[in-house]
Image: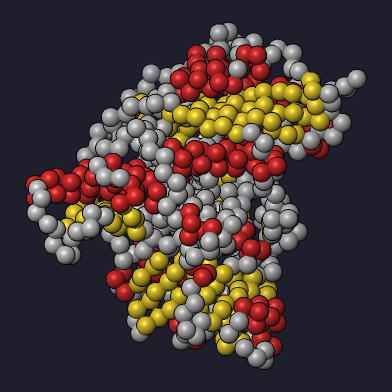
Amino acid sequence: MSSDLARLEGLEKVTGTARYAGDQQPDGLAHAWPVPATIARGDVTAVDTAPALAIPGVLAVLTHRDAPALTLPEDGDPTLAVLQSPRVAHRGQVVALVVATTPQDARAGAEAVRVTYSAEPHDVVLTDDHPGLYTPAYANGGHPAVRERGDVDHAHRQADRRLDLTYRIGPLHNHPMEPHTATARWDGRRLTVHDSSQGANTVQETLAALFGLDTGDVTVVSEHVGGGFGSKGTTRPHAVLAAMAARSVDRPVRLALPRALLPALTGHRAPSVHRVRLGADRDGRLTALAHEVTTRSSTVREFVEQSAVPARVMYAAPHSRTAHRVVRQDVPTPSWMRAPGETPGMFALECAMDELAHACGLDPVELRLRNEPDTEPDTGRPFSSRNLAACLREGARRFDWPREHPARPRRDGRWLLGSGVAASTYPALVAPSTAEVLARPDGTFLVRTDATDIGTGARTVLAAVAARALDVPADRVSVAVGSTELPRAPLAGGSAGTASWGWAVHEACTRLRAELADRGTAALPAAGLRCHADTTEAVRARPDYARHAFGAQFALVAVDADTAEVRVRRLLGVFAAGRILNARTARSQLLGGMVMGVSMALLEHSTMDPRFGDHAEHDLASYHVAVNADVPFVEAHWIDEEDPHLNPLGAKGIGEIGIVGTAAAVANAVHHATGIRVRDLPVRPESLLPHLPDVP
Ligand code: MOS
């Protein structure tokens, strides 16, 4: 049974008492403002700090000449070696940091610093025939960059139905509502940082290594976080800079990144080009599936989004090739973003499946049902559970698919109506976690674990898990998360949080309940009774299954016959993600993901300016994200899925699958409405206008 708890910290958030990293006000707090590089490649030859230091209130200007030295571990993230060398690897890289008594003075100081460069020609334009392209050993997540089964070229040539299609997705940026912010202070050799991050102990370990400290000498608190979407999943330069600055001026320092610097400093989804070749027999059964992805990273670090990986999971095709190529360019380093891999990969694959349905004269739901595999196609492993077919059927029923997807699309005045479908998938990951629960004599319980609530409702779902395991009402359970002072737990990423933390909470509570039962009616000691759990062994002992969540998304769009404006009128998703633990927050997560998918389909786009070597959109006025008015009617549903091979909760992650497939469903619906295939996201009026049918 799923619970339906409202967000535990909702009142704190709406009344403004929830404390974020930038709300910390330690005595003597100073403020830092970065100076971004204005070239994309070259060296800093001089930094004139005098005009900044002349501003009253400016306390210090850090440059590569005098900033505290950092120790980057061998496997460390080189984007964190800030102010360590004169080398500039991308525009917007931090080349100096001004510290002042007020944010205004820090900003004025940053504008006054004069930096001189020796610039070199830069390379920032991704093409699919770039001479620097190479095949890496691995794409992200440890996935081999290339996988081949059978002879896909031959099978494709021999197929009755053949498609060879190219899809393009531009660079995308996360832009959480709360910009990346850290407040740092030193007490001798002890460092305390309040950071807006997806995992306090990830930041703790990174900072300890960089500053040569013991892990125990660093405390990181991420109590409330205003969104991250992957961009706060690793330690970001702002946290390192705040700690450096605090050491240099010997007082607490806050660095709240101005939104304009987020695109260059916090990671982004690299642009990608997807060549998808599908071969099928007359009945639409795939014989060949090739998904070859071209993408890029920075010169600083190899980061290869694993976008061809979902094609290894989705459809039964005896001959297959899935591959990634990458080129290193003079651009900011890409990083994690909203269902990395699946989001861009499934846009390409699910649009291609729609195109195949047309080529075969088949309904696109039926085409997918015909290509359901018995085992995970790439590995032959059994699925722990796979209910894509059930999602497609349930979604079709709820959407009234046959009626909403007529052979001749309908009109509503001058609006052309069309509907589209796409499948979703995301791996059901889990990581070892610890947790502790305390029973107090007054009958209340406290769950403690260093989970992170990035706006997802992590506290709430953990309270639900604890209440069920303890068999007590949820209002007797409180939850402490978001601090390295709490039992160690993995970061909020990979949609693995609830399954990982929840497993440990469930264990600790189950044990505590047994101990309480053993005690009978004996009163608890004043300090209460504590149980601890560590799932490391249990997670490692799991048998080898292919574990993935699945879903089906249906979209109804209207395209203005005159202006080609696209409006999504209805969006419906049905997901199979194991047991849904808390319905209210689960629905919110799925809806949020679907809205992001609409955003990706129609609005979000960053433009690489080839002359300046920079993404042109630096604010939410130019980087458009979907708002309420863009998404009138969204529904998220799920089917009851029993999966005994996951974890004691029976839960798969739901944080990211909502976005996967949405953009393809929208683009497929635009095709149904207009007959126009847009293979280049976002779907913009200017892509449609030249091809719009004449409407009387
Ligand atoms: Mo998510 S992109 O795994 O934080």
Using the image as rendered, state which of residue 641 and residue 234 is in the foreground. 641
Q: Residue at x 60, y 26 (%)?
A: 554
Confirm whether residue 194 shows in the render. yes
Q: Residue at x 52, y 75 (%)?
A: 254
Return the x and y of residue 2 as percentages of the image width and height. Answer: 37, 35
Using the image as rendered, state which of residue 274 and residue 299 is in the foreground. 274
Quadrant in the rendering for residue 97: bottom right
Q: Relative to 581, does residue 97 appear above or below in the rendering? A: below
Confirm whether residue 143 shows in the render. no
Q: Relative to 157, does residue 571 appear above or below in the rendering? A: below
Return the x and y of residue 362 as percentages of the image width and height. Answer: 61, 11
Q: Relative to 99, does residue 313 appear above or below in the rendering? A: above
- Judged from this view, the residue extending furthest toward the right is 696
- Judged from this view, the residue extending furthest toward the top is 282
Return the x and y of residue 144 as percentages of the image width and height. Answer: 42, 39
Tag count in the figure? 0
Q: Residue at x 31, y 69 (%)?
A: 215
Q: Relative to 639, does residue 266 appear above or below in the rendering? A: below
Q: Is residue 303 left or right of residue 477?
A: right
Quarter placement of the N terminus: top left
Quadrant in the rendering for residue 615: bottom right
Q: Is residue 542 left or right of residue 457?
A: left
Q: Residue at x 69, y 59 (%)?
A: 618
User: Which colouring convention does the figure follow?
Assistant: secondary structure
Quarter placement of the C terminus: top right
Using the image as rendered, state which of residue 586 and residue 475 is in the foreground. 475
